[in-house]
Amino acid sequence: MRLLRPLDRYVLGEFTKVLAATALGFPALVIIIDVSEKLDAYLSRKLPIADILLAYLYGVPDTMFLVLPAAVLFATVFTIGGFTRHSELTAAKASGVSFHRFIAPIAVGALAATGFGLILAELVPPLNARRLELLQEKVFRNADKRSNFAYAAEEGRVYKVGYASVQEAKLSAIEIERKGLGPDYPTYVIAAKEGSWTPDGGWMLRDGVMHILPDTLSNVTVRFDSLTDARFTEAPSSLMANPKAPAEMGYRDLGRFIAAMERSGTNVNKLRVERMLKLAIPATCFIIMLIGAPLATSTQRGGTAFGVGVSLAITVIFLMLLQLTQAIGAGGIIKPELAAWLPGALFAVIGSVLLLKVRT
């Protein structure tokens, strides 16, 4: 027995066509606009055309992640609006299919888009890092020296450095933290007074202590005169680069970075909002469908233009709310994690009310 009836497959198929077109069309439009604005700057850096094209290809998933809720909204409004204008929705109701049952396949499609968004959230960070590398957007704060900074390395490692000098190839007041998973892969923290770059391509740390934390109750402490961390291979010049942006870190890596920054007394409210948005934005795909579905039944009065207007208005309002709540969360007025979910929660309430009022 098939899980989807013919009507369900038809509705889901129409929704998927519009969703695919908008999810790919929006990034293409963004790329065209961005290229027209920045091409001269890229050419002035003497970047190969192949690198520029590849960089924009790497940027497609990031743009798709950001526009996915809008793509779901457009797909919902245009799909249901088309069914309404062609009386297909009326025919379904006459056959005993309620409005809520009719849009069930669209809800399934929106949930699938949410899952796809969560996958994109983890795929995007390394692609963004590669994109910035190709476009030479990774600038350096200082060509020779840097003080009191944190550096997010690979595998969730975080370096906190009091002072670094490229010319001298030395560090001072170093702390390295690696979050573990348990006794077989424990958390450890290395603190050293100084470090020097070795010809072998690594750092020799001196006069320090290493804390190994197999669990929350254990702390094995080892003091050392000198120690070489095989994973600490970033060259002195690499440590001068700007730290990774939230867009270049996955959900878990960003969580480790935030925890390390909190222990050093840094305000991480903005980072906490950014981290939670990696979940909140994909979830909005389903939430925004709740608003688009009932509003789409009124597109018969204004046709396609009305559908475009409704979709754009909702998208703009959502983006404005998102910017507002990000600022509120970063300022500490409300809990950052709550701030990231506020626009979605508000839209969920409005959408649920509208959905309940639709004539079924």
Image: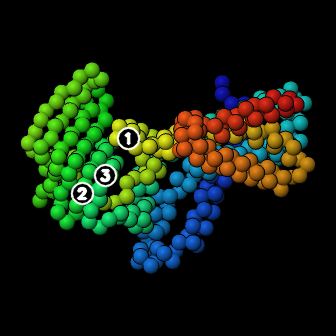
Task: Name the foreground residue: 258 vs 358.
Answer: 258
- 115 left or right, relative to 286: left
Indicate the amino acid at tag 2.
Ala
Alpha carbon separation for disc pair 3 and 2? 9 Å
Alpha carbon separation for disc pair 3 and 1? 12 Å
- 76 left or right, relative to 187: right
Residue that numbered label 1 is attached to: 265
Q: Which type of secondary structure does the marked residue at label 1 adopt?
A: loop
As displayed, is residue 131 above or below residue 318?
below
Q: Residue at x 47, y 50 (%)?
A: 247
As displayed, is residue 257 above or below residue 172?
above
Task: Name the foreground residue: 250 vs 212.
Answer: 212
**Mark 3 / mark 1, whichever is N-terminal:** 3
Task: Name the foreground residue: 62 vs 350.
Answer: 350
Q: How is the image coloured?
A: rainbow
Residue 213: x, y in percent?
24, 28
Residue that numbered label 3 is attached to: 148
Residue that numbered label 2 is attached to: 164
Residue 164: x, y in percent?
24, 57
Residue 73: x, y in percent?
71, 45
Indicate the amino acid at tag 1.
Gly
**Mark 3 / mark 2, whichever is N-terminal:** 3
Alpha carbon separation for disc pair 2 and 1? 20 Å
